[in-house]
C-alpha cells in the first residue's frame, strides 16, 4: 500500500484515513505493508508494517552527488507535503517552509546555506522519484504481497511502477480529484493526467463516495464496472469527549475547515446574516484559514455582523476538539466534497450537523441535515430550527451520535477486501 | 524685535496595544491589553526620545532666557502609561511645565475618533483630558488639537462650544488652495474660533525627511524665511517620537534641535510663540471652509486611514453603538476599557491602504495584516459587549 503520510505526523485527512484502513484491513485478516515517502519511526505499526521510502536505495539511478542531494531534499520536503495540495499550493507551502528553514539556518550557520528555490516546480519530479523508489520496494518484496493499493494522485505513479515491475494487480483509491481542488474550467492538467493514467492502468478504482465515483466515470471516462464506492469511516476509539468551559452564553454555529472556494464559506456567511436578522441569540464561528479568509472577513464586515461572526484562524490539534465541544450546530456547506469527515467528528461530539448534498458524507449520514450548498434560505432555516426547537436538536444529536459510531472502518474494509479478492486471480 | 513667529507643537501619544485575544477568550478573560509590549515599547521610546528630548528642551528654554517656547499635546493613554511604566517621564514634563514657557494643548483623552463617532463622548473625553493635564501640570489648556488634527466645520463648532478659542489642524492643500498656511485663520461656521494650520512641507522636512535632507539649523532657517516670506507664522507640528525614535539619534536630529533656537534667534526674522500666544499676536486673514473632514495623515489628508474600508466602518459602528447602554450602566471600569477601545490606533491597524503610504502604516502596526487586527479587535469588542449586557441586565 502506497500512502503519503501516516499518523501521528499528518497534514491532511489522508493519513488518518490510511490508518483507519490498515487497521480495518487487519481486522478483516488482511496484512499490509505501508510505504510512505518519509516515516518518522513513531507511527503505530500494530496493524501494518511501515516501510520508509527514504531508507531505500534506488538501484535504477546513478548516484552522483547532485542526485544524492536532490534525494535528500526530496526526503526532507516529503514530510511537508500535503496530500490534497495541488502543485501551486504545494509551491506556496514549500516556500513558507523554506523561509522558515532559511531563517533557522541563518540563525545557526549564518547565510552559508542556500536553497535552490526550485522545489515548488519540482513536485512532479518528486512524484516520479517516489515512483522509482516504490518500484524498487515492490521488486524487493515481490513475494510478500498480492495486491498493490495506492492512495491519491501523489502515489499513483508509485502504484503504476509497482504494477509494471511485478505484474500484480493495482487498486487505486480516490480520496479527492482535481475537480475538488479547482473549478471545472480551472484544473491542473498535469495532475489530471496522472489521475487519469492511474485510473486507466488500475484493475479497480475505489472512490470514497458515489459523488466521487460519478466524477471518475464522467470526467475521467473510466469504465463504471471498474469503479467501486467504499465510503469512508472514522475511528473514534480512545476518544473521550472534551468537557470545556464555555465563555459565550449564546449557542455557537461552527464552520471548520479550509476557507476556500470549494468549502462554500460565503454561503455560511449569508445564512448567518439571515439568522441574525431573526435572532441575536447566536454566534457564528468560522474556524480555519485559507485563500478566501480575507474575503470572508470583509464579507461579514460588509453585512454588519462581525460582532456575532468570529474567526479563529488556523486551529491545531486540541483546539479543533475544543471548537467542536464549544459548538451547538456544525455546518459544512461544501460546493464539492469527495467525502468530508468533519461532520462525523461533530456528530460524534454531540453536535448536530448541516451538510451540503454535494458531499460524500451526505450519502451515509441519515441524521445530518442536508441542503443544497447554494440554498442559503434552507441553511438559515435549519440553523434557526436547531437553535429554536430543542426537541429537534436533541433528536438529531442522539441519533447522529449512534449513527456515526456505527460507521466503522471494519465494515468499510470488508468491502475493500472484496475488491482485493476480485482482482487477485 | 522679531515680527514673525515659529509655533512648535509636538504630539506625544502611545496606543494601548491589545493582546492576542482569541475567540476562546470571549466571555472568560476580560484583560485586553498586551502589558508586556506596552511596557517594553514605552520604556524604549522613553529612553530614546522622551527623556533625552525633554532634557534638551529644558536646557534650551533655560539657555534662551524665555525666548524659546514650545507646545505639547500628550494623550491620556500616553499619560496613563507613563504613570504606570515610566513615571520619570511625567516628572520631566512637570519640570518643563514649571518653566512657564510650555503650553499644553487639550485633546481627546484616548486619542480617539470620538469627534466623528459621538458628540457627547467627544466632549466627555476632552473634559477628562483637560482635567488630567491640570492635575499633573497645573495649567488648564486653552487651545485644542484633535486626534491626528482631524477637523471640519462641525467639529470646529463643538470645540468652540467647549470653550476653546484656538484649534490646530492641517494646512491641507485641497482646502487651502492658493492660500498660505502661514497666517491665522478662522472657522467658516464659527468666526470666533481661530485656526492654526500645519505647514506640512516644513514640518515633514524634519519629521519624515530629516535623515535624507541632512539639513543644518542655519539652512533650515533659510527655508523658513523663504517659505514664510509673506506670512506671519510657521506652524511646525509633528510627532514627538520623531526625535530619537522615527529619526534615530545617529541622524543628528538632537544636534539639529539643539542648534535651531539659537540659529532662529540670531537671524532675527522669527521668534517662538505657543499656539495661544500666536492667536493673540496676529489677526486672522480669512476664514477656512472645511465641509469634508481633514487630518494630517497620508497623501489624502483625510480620515480614510481609520475609516476607509468596510472593516474599519464596521468596527467603528459597533464600538459607538454601545454608548447609550454604557451611559445607563455608568460603570467606571467599563468606561475605561471603552475609552481604550476607541483609540484611533486600533482602526489604523485595520487600514488596507498598503500601497501609497504602506511604509508608514507598517512601521506603526503590530499586526501582520489588517484582517488579523480586525478579528482581534472584534473578539475584544464581543467580550466587552457581554460584560456590558450583563451589567445592564443586573440593573433590571
Image (spheres, coloured by chain):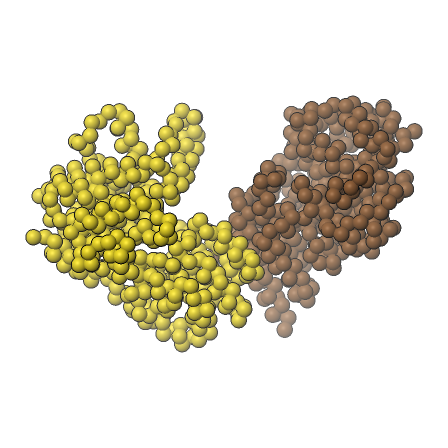
The residue depicted at 31 percent of the width and 41 percent of the height is A79
Q: Residue lying at the far left in this picture: please name it.
A: A425
In percent of width and height, residue A261 lies at: 42, 54
Q: Can the viewer see residue B219? A: yes
Chain A appears what colour? Answer: yellow
Q: Is residue B89 left or right of residue A349?
A: right
The residue nearer to you, when weighing A277 against A251, is: A277
Query: Relative to A247, is B170 above or below?
Result: above
Q: Can the viewer see residue A44? A: no
In percent of width and height, residue A307 lies at: 55, 60
Give the quarter of the image for residue A393: bottom left
Q: Is residue A103 left or right of residue B2?
A: left
Chain B appears what colour? Answer: brown
In percent of width and height, residue B319 lies at: 63, 58
The residue depicted at 33 percent of the width and 53 percent of the height is A179
Query: Relative to B353, is B379 above or below?
Result: below
The residue nearer to you, when weighing A348 against A162, is: A162
The residue depicted at 27 percent of the width and 32 percent of the height is A71
Amino acid at each position: 500500500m502506497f500512502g503519503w503520510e501516516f499518523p501521528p505526523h499528518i497534514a491532511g485527512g489522508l493519513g488518518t484515513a490510511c490508518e483507519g484502513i490498515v487497521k480495518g484491513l487487519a481486522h478483516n485478516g488482511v496484512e499490509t505493508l505501508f510505504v510512505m515517502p518519509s516515516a518518522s519511526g513513531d507511527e503505530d505499526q500494530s496493524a501494518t508494517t511501515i516501510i520508509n521510502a527514504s531508507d531505500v536505495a534506488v538501484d535504477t539511478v546513478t548516484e552522483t552527488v547532485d542526485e544524492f542531494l536532490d534525494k535528500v531534499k526530496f526526503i526532507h520536503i516529503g514530510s511537508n507535503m500535503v496530500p490534497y495540495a495541488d502543485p501551486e499550493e504545494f509551491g506556496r507551502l514549500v516556500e513558507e517552509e523554506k523561509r522558515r528553514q532559511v531563517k533557522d539556518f541563518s540563525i545557526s550557520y549564518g547565510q552559508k546555506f542556500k536553497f535552490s528555490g526550485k522545489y515548488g516546480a519540482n513536485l512532479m519530479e518528486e512524484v516520479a522519484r517516489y515512483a522509482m523508489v516504490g518500484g524498487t520496494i515492490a521488486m524487493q518484496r515481490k513475494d510478500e504481497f498480492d495486491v498493490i493499493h495506492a492512495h491519491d494522485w501523489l502515489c499513483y505513479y508509485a502504484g503504476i511502477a509497482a504494477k509494471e515491475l511485478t505484474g500484480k494487480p493495482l487498486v487505486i483509491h480516490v480520496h479527492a480529484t482535481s475537480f475538488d481542488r479547482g473549478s471545472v474550467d480551472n484544473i491542473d492538467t498535469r495532475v489530471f493526467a496522472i489521475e487519469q493514467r492511474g485510473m486507466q492502468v488500475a484493475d479497480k478504482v475505489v472512490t470514497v463516495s458515489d459523488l466521487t465515483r460519478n466524477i471518475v466515470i464522467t470526467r475521467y471516462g473510466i469504465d463504471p464496472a471498474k469503479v467501486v464506492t467504499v465510503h469512508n469511516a472514522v475511528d473514534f476509539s480512545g476518544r473521550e469527549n472534551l468537557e470545556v468551559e464555555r465563555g459565550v452564553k449564546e449557542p455557537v454555529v461552527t464552520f471548520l475547515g479550509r476557507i476556500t472556494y470549494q468549502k462554500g464559506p460565503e454561503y455560511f456567511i449569508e445564512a448567518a446574516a439571515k439568522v441574525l436578522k431573526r435572532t441575536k441569540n447566536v454566534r457564528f464561528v468560522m474556524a480555519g484559514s485559507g485563500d478566501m479568509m480575507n474575503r470572508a472577513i470583509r464579507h461579514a464586515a460588509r453585512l454588519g455582523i462581525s460582532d456575532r461572526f468570529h474567526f479563529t484562524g488556523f486551529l491545531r490539534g486540541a483546539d479543533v476538539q475544543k471548537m467542536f465541544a464549544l459548538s451547538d450546530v456544525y455546518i459544512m456547506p461544501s460546493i464539492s466534497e469527495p467525502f468530508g469527515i468533519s461532520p462525523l467528528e461533530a456528530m460524534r461530539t454531540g453536535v448536530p450537523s448541516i451538510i451540503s448534498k454535494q458531499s460524500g458524507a451526505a450519502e451515509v449520514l441519515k441524521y445530518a441535515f442536508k441542503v443544497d450548498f447554494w440554498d442559503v434560505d434552507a441553511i438559515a432555516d435549519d440553523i434557526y430550527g436547531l437553535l429554536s426547537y430543542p426537541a429537534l436538536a436533541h433528536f438529531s444529536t442522539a441519533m447522529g451520535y449512534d449513527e456515526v459510531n456505527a460507521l466503522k472502518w471494519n465494515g468499510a474494509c470488508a468491502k475493500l477486501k472484496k475488491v482485493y479478492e476480485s482482482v487477485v486471480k | 524685535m522679531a515680527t514673525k513667529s515659529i509655533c512648535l507643537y509636538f504630539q506625544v501619544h502611545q496606543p494601548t496595544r491589545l493582546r492576542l485575544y482569541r475567540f476562546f477568550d470571549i466571555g472568560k478573560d476580560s484583560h485586553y491589553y498586551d502589558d508586556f509590549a506596552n511596557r517594553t515599547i514605552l520604556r524604549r521610546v522613553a529612553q530614546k526620545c522622551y527623556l533625552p528630548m525633554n532634557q534638551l528642551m529644558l536646557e534650551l528654554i533655560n539657555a534662551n532666557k524665555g525666548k524659546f517656547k514650545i507646545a505639547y499635546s500628550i494623550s491620556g493613554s500616553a499619560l496613563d502609561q507613563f504613570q504606570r511604566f515610566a513615571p520619570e517621564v511625567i516628572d520631566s514634563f512637570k519640570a518643563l511645565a514649571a518653566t512657564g514657557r510650555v503650553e499644553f494643548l487639550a485633546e481627546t483623552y484616548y486619542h480617539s475618533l470620538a469627534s466623528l463617532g459621538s458628540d457627547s463622548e467627544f466632549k466627555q473625553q476632552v473634559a477628562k483630558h483637560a482635567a488630567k493635564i491640570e492635575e499633573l501640570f497645573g495649567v488648564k489648556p486653552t487651545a485644542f488639537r484633535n486626534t491626528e488634527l482631524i477637523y471640519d466645520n462641525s467639529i470646529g463648532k463643538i470645540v468652540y462650544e467647549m470653550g476653546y478659542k484656538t484649534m490646530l489642524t492641517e494646512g491641507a492643500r485641497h482646502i487651502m488652495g492658493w492660500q498660505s498656511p502661514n497666517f491665522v485663520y478662522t472657522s467658516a461656521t464659527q468666526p470666533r474660533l481661530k485656526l492654526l494650520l500645519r505647514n506640512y512641507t516644513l514640518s515633514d522636512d524634519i519629521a519624515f525627511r530629516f535623515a535624507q535632507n541632512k539639513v543644518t539649523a542655519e539652512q533650515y532657517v533659510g527655508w523658513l524665511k523663504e517659505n514664510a516670506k509673506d506670512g506671519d507664522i510657521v506652524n511646525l507640528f509633528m510627532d514627538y517620537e520623531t526625535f530619537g525614535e522615527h529619526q534615530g539619534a545617529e541622524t543628528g536630529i538632537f544636534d539639529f534641535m539643539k542648534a535651531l533656537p539659537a540659529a532662529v534667534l540670531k537671524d532675527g526674522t522669527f521668534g517662538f510663540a505657543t499656539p495661544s500666544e500666536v492667536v493673540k499676536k496676529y489677526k486672522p486673514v480669512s476664514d477656512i471652509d472645511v465641509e469634508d473632514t481633514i487630518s494630517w495623515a497620508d497623501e489624502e489628508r483625510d480620515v480614510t486611514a481609520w475609516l476607509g474600508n468596510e472593516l474599519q466602518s464596521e468596527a467603528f459602528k459597533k464600538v459607538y453603538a454601545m454608548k447609550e447602554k454604557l451611559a445607563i450602566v455608568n460603570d467606571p471600569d467599563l468606561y475605561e476599557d471603552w475609552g481604550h477601545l476607541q483609540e484611533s490606533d486600533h482602526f489604523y491597524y485595520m487600514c488596507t491602504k498598503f500601497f501609497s503610504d504602506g511604509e508608514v502604516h507598517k512601521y506603526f502596526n503590530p499586526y501582520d495584516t489588517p484582517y488579523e487586527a480586525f478579528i482581534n479587535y472584534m473578539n475584544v469588542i464581543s467580550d466587552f459587549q457581554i460584560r456590558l449586557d450583563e451589567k445592564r441586565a443586573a440593573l433590571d
